[in-house]
Amino acid sequence: MNLTHIKRIRVLLADDHQIVREGLKALLERDKGIEIVGETADGVSTVRFAKKYLPDVVVMDITMPNLNGIEATQQITDEIPDVRVVVLSMYLDKHFVAKMLRAGARGYLRKDCASEELAKAISVVAANRFYISPELGIDFQKDVFVASEIPNFVAFALLTPKEREVLQLIAEGKTSKEIAFRLNVSAKTIDKHRAHIMEKLDIHSIAELTKFAIREGITSIEK
């Protein structure tokens, strides 16, 4: 069969571990229907790349620096809805699955899945359908889309997107000055954000904020 005229699915790999990206690239490039068009290591560059190059599918990790995968997925699917997102994560709790799907992702797999399953998920999602790995043991209709059974995480219920972004950077050890420079605002504005975050969450130390951010999946325990 002549594959030269078959349009390949253009895929962006988003993960903060280079060895993971290299492994995924090597595995997926075996599939003649997939073309790896780029790699990114944090949420901000993932959103930027997706806007500029419009891949068909982003394979997205949840815990990435600067902007986590949940926020990056939300921005991508809100601003460029033709770009689909497949989540590849170590987080297996159905609450994370629900949160990523609510952010706009259309697929969710374990990080230790077989390459054939990931290629299948990419193909399914590129066709504008959903793919939830059977290995997760989730009833797609019952567990994921019944909002009353799956409450929002506290951070997403109480904090604005900007406050969540600031919270992630605080948890990753950035100073107010560094965060202000990154977000193009004043350090005083960041201090106000931090005060509002602490007030809303009733948390009063950076250490406790960091623990909260890890628990909520805003940043990883490695950061």
Image (tube, helix red, strand yellow):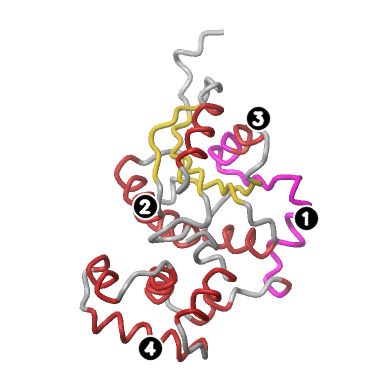
Few, some or many residues within 10 Å of mark 2 (<14, 14–19, 20+): many
Tag nearer the camera, 2 or 1: 2
Q: What's the residue type where badge 4 is placed?
A: Ala
Residue 37, horizontal then vertical, whole percent: 39, 32
Q: What's the residue type where badge 1 is placed?
A: Asp
Q: Which residue is mark 1?
A: 139
Q: Which residue is mark 2?
A: 47
Q: Please determine whether, in this image, residue 121 is positioned above or below residue 199.
A: above
Few, some or many residues within 10 Å of mark 3 (<14, 14–19, 20+): few
Judged left or right of residue 12, residue 138 is right
Give the Cα separation between the discs numbered 4 and 1: 40 Å
| Mark sitting on residue 152 | none
Asked which secondary structure carries label 2, the reply is helix
Judged left or right of residue 211, residue 83 is left
The residue at the point 39 percent across, 73 percent down is 170
Give the Cα separation between the discs numbered 4 and 2: 28 Å
Q: What's the residue type where badge 3 is placed?
A: Glu
The residue at the point 62 percent across, 49 percent down is 108
The magenta segment is 122-148
**Which is more N-terminal, label 3 or label 2?**
2
Give the Cα separation between the discs numbered 3 and 1: 22 Å
Residue 53, horizontal then vertical, whole percent: 32, 40
Q: Which residue is mark 4?
A: 195
Q: Which residue is mark 3?
A: 116
Residue 93, horizontal then vertical, whole percent: 70, 61
Residues under numbered marks 2 and 1 in contact, where contact means CB atoms less than 8 Å apart: no
- Would you identify the image quadrant in which residue 189 lies? bottom left
**Which is more N-terminal, label 2 or label 4?**
2
